[in-house]
Every structure is written in C-alpha cells, then in structure tokens.
Image: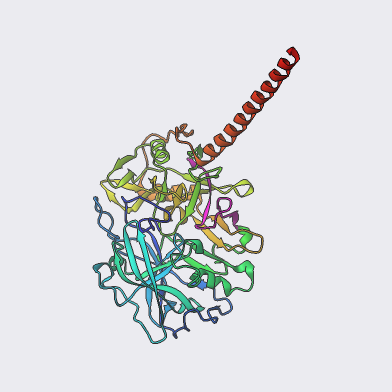
Amino acid sequence: MGGVLTADKLQASYSRPTVLDEVMVSFSRINLGTRLGSSSTAAKAKAGSGRIPVHRVRRSELSKTRTSLAQTDLSLADSNQFIGGQHFMVLLDTGSSDLWVVSSDCTTLDCSGVPKYEQTPSLSLTDVPFHLTYLMGNVTGLVGSDTVTVGEFQVSSQIFAMANATGGLGLSGAGNSGILGLAFPAEASIADTVGRTLLENLFSALNDTSKRFFAFKLGRDEDDSSFTVGELDSIYANSTDDLTHTPVYAPHGSLYDYWKLPLQSLTINGTSFELSKSRVKGAAAPIAVLDTGTTLALGPTQDVARFWESVGGARQTDRGWEVPCNRAVVVGLVLGQGSSQKEYVLDPADVSWKEGSVDGGWCLGGVQGNDGVFAADWLLGDTFLRNVYVTHHAAIDSKPPAIGLRGLTDPAAALAAFVNDRGADTSPPANVSSHAPQSNTLSGGDICGIATAGGFVAGVMLAVLFYTFLKLCRRRRRHY
C-alpha cells in the first residue's frame, strides 16, 4: 500500500501526499469457524458467487502533512463480507498479503471509533505475535483463526491477525478496521506454517483452475467500481481473451512477491519518453508494481523530474509536483513484454489530479518521485488503475502467475471532457525530453555484465600469458 506501505517490503519512502485512494470491503455477521490448524480449513462458494458488489465511499485524509490536503478521498466498500460473526470495513490491498482487523483490546487513538473484533467462544487464538511497520504507521497484535466470508465465499479456520495496537494509520479517519491483502504468500507476515492467506483459500474453492483469478475496476463515481473473484465483470470484458496478459515478473530463482510487470516507457501526447535503467537485478526494463493501496504513480525522481519538465508548466513544492489544473496532456504507459507490450492511456484528470486538492489553480500531479522502492522501480496506483480493467491470475500447472490488462480510457474523449471541465489550456505544448540521460550508477545487470566480461578478459589475458611463457621456455630449450 502506498502511504501505508510496509517499510520492510516495498520500502516506499514517498511521504508528501498522504491522501490515498483505497479499495475497501467490509465484513458482516455469519456463523463462527472451526479451530486453528484443522484439516477442515477450506473455502466454499456458491455457483456464480464471484461478484462482490462495491461502491465508492469518502473518507478523511490518513495523517497530517506539511500542506493541508483534501478532507475526503476515494474508497470502495461493500456489505457482504464477514469475520467471526462481526461486520468490518477493511482496505483491499494488492500491495500486501495479510488479513488483519483491530481487536477490542486496541485502545490507541488511531483505532478509536471504528468497529473492533470481539473474541468469541469459537475463536482459535494462538501465541503467535503479529507486527508490521508501515511507512506511516504500525500494527501489533496476535494471530488467530475464525470463519471468514467474502461475498458468497466462506473460509473456515481462516488465519488472520487481531491488532491490539495501531499507530499512524488513520483508521479512525478512514472508517476502516483493517487490511485484506491480495499479494503473494511470500510477502505475508503470518508464516505459511501457521496458515494460508485468504487469497490462497479463495482460489482453492475454484476447482476450475482457469478461474483462479480476481479482477477489479476502480471507479470514478460511487457505483462504477467492480471486484470479482473467479469471474469477469461483463461490463468491462466478456472473455479473458479481451485482456492482454503478461507473466508476473520475478527474478530468476526468486519467489513471486507483488503483482509486477515490465514498464517499457511512457508517452506524452504520443511522443515516446524513455525511462532510466531498472535497478532491479536482472530486469531488462523498469519493473512496475500494480498497487491498489497507492494513490498515485510513483517513480524514480530523475525520471519524474524530466517527465514534468517535458509536460511543462509544473512546479515542485513541499507536497510534491504540482501542475496547473487545466494543463491538458495525454500520458500513456507502455507495459508488458514481447507480444504483450501495449500502451495504456491515462485520463488527463489523473495527470492533473484535482481530487488531491487545489492550491490556487494548481493541482497535485498524478505522477510523483520516489527513490525508495527497492522491490521495483515504479508503483502504479489508482491514478493508473482507474484507466484499466485488471485481472490477477494464480499460477496454473506450468504457467506462471499473470496480469491481464484492458485499457478503458479513450484518449480523445477523455481529453475533450477534461477541457470542457477545466477550461482551455493556453500554455505552450509539451516539449518532450525523450531520451533518458546516461546514469553514472551501475544497475545490477551492468555489474553482472561487467563482472562476466571482466572474467572473460582476465581469462583471455591469463591464457595468452601462459601460452607466451610456454613458447619462451621452448625457445630457450632450443638454445641449450
């Protein structure tokens, strides 16, 4: 989650705009689950049960910043999820893997005024501690299990954490009681020896392995958002063939952690904009994480500064890059690799982000600088995700996990609507600095290449010296 990212995972250090777009779901009343570690831990689902209704709700900002930001924000919520017979609102986050909710033992100011989990007779409580340190806060508690229902999916003995202390997460302002993580199990703080993640158990309910995916569309209005498990929303796609699929990126020999894919380049008004070399070891192109918990698109500060210089008219302030609210520019992101490489266009309203608050005609930029993401080069948050329909597929047999994308923004229509709403942009057109400057910093690939080449050269030199030595010895022998 951007703004609320685990410091020991994605390591995002972006701290200026803290108002976040977040996907929320909620948990309501059901029967309680079986005991922890029981072999009956399983997910059950009714036919056609993958559709989980969601809608947009508003919330206050997470925390105070140097510059006052908007007092409301975007979220998704629904009323058809449950934990242990109790109703909760939680953040739906593709940038983390654990499920946790605040417990009745949480008395910190941060968790005041939100529904709290009350221990019940059927709760299986362990002595396993739970702790996460986030960029702007932390959570501490204990691990237990209970029955969890998401839509029509019911998981018995689902492992989750009960937070007895939280700080700096702004739960009371947001109105949510925890987080439902949808990243890969490798990133779960609750060890797999204790129990499987909720996403793993949801997928296990789908006997048809081709349906082991979840999909979402982040909406702009109250009722145009979508979240489904095991099926597509026909409003956005009728078949998985309607989307372009790219295998999730993971370095050779590494476990999958986040929903990553290559980001080849950007475009500004149709002109290509190169990106700096990836800092991810072995990556041929910059790597991007799709993260519903991050509001904006976050990238290396050098690239972002050149991006806004190319857009023109932008300024850098204490809260980040700002741009005139009527600056009309069409930005695209070229994602994927090989045959899956494709451009996805952003609505100009996501580049000049008016919902991030207005400062005398200046809007917060939808792209901001961040050099603290070590698991990837870019985080693509909601200013990107609102423009696409996304599917997240589990690994099946010999096929790796994959991300499916379908662009939903028509650039001409979006630009016309933007100008009609914001007014004409009379500033000079964008002057795109297409080529990324040569960096003095060596990437992981550069270092490996130099080491390999150096070893080859050294080997050749040693071989030549050895051959010359032998030849000289032979000549000397002839003289004797």
The foreground one among 260 and 9 is: 9
Q: Which residue is drawn at 39% across and 62% down?
A: 22
In the orientation shown, which residue stands out farthest toward the top?
Answer: 479
User: Which percent across, then down, holds residue 285?
Assistant: 54, 43
- Is 17 placed left or right of 196 in the picture? left
Magenta region: which residues? Answer: 243-268
User: Which percent across, then down, holds residue 463?
Assistant: 66, 28
The foreground one among 109 and 333 is: 109
The foreground one among 199 and 455 is: 455
User: Which percent across, then down, holds residue 129?
Assistant: 38, 70
- Based on the picture, tell me whether residue 419 belongs to the magenta stretch: no
**Quarter of the figure with residue 119:** bottom left
| Residue 184 showing in the rendered view | no
The quadrant of the rendering that contains the C terminus is top right
Q: Residue at x 25, y 73 (%)?
A: 107
User: Which percent across, then down, holds residue 73?
Assistant: 33, 60
The foreground one among 159 and 171 is: 159
Colouring method of the image: rainbow
**Quarter of the figure with residue 398:** bottom right
- Is 105 placed left or right of 474 in the picture? left
Residue 277 higher or lower than 174, as above or below? above
In the orientation shown, which residue stands out farthest toward the front?
Answer: 480
- Based on the picture, tell me whether residue 251 belongs to the magenta stretch: yes
| Residue 6 showing in the rendered view | yes
Q: Residue at x 50, y 46 (%)?
A: 280
The quadrant of the rendering that contains the N terminus is bottom left
Q: Residue at x 60, y 73 (%)?
A: 206
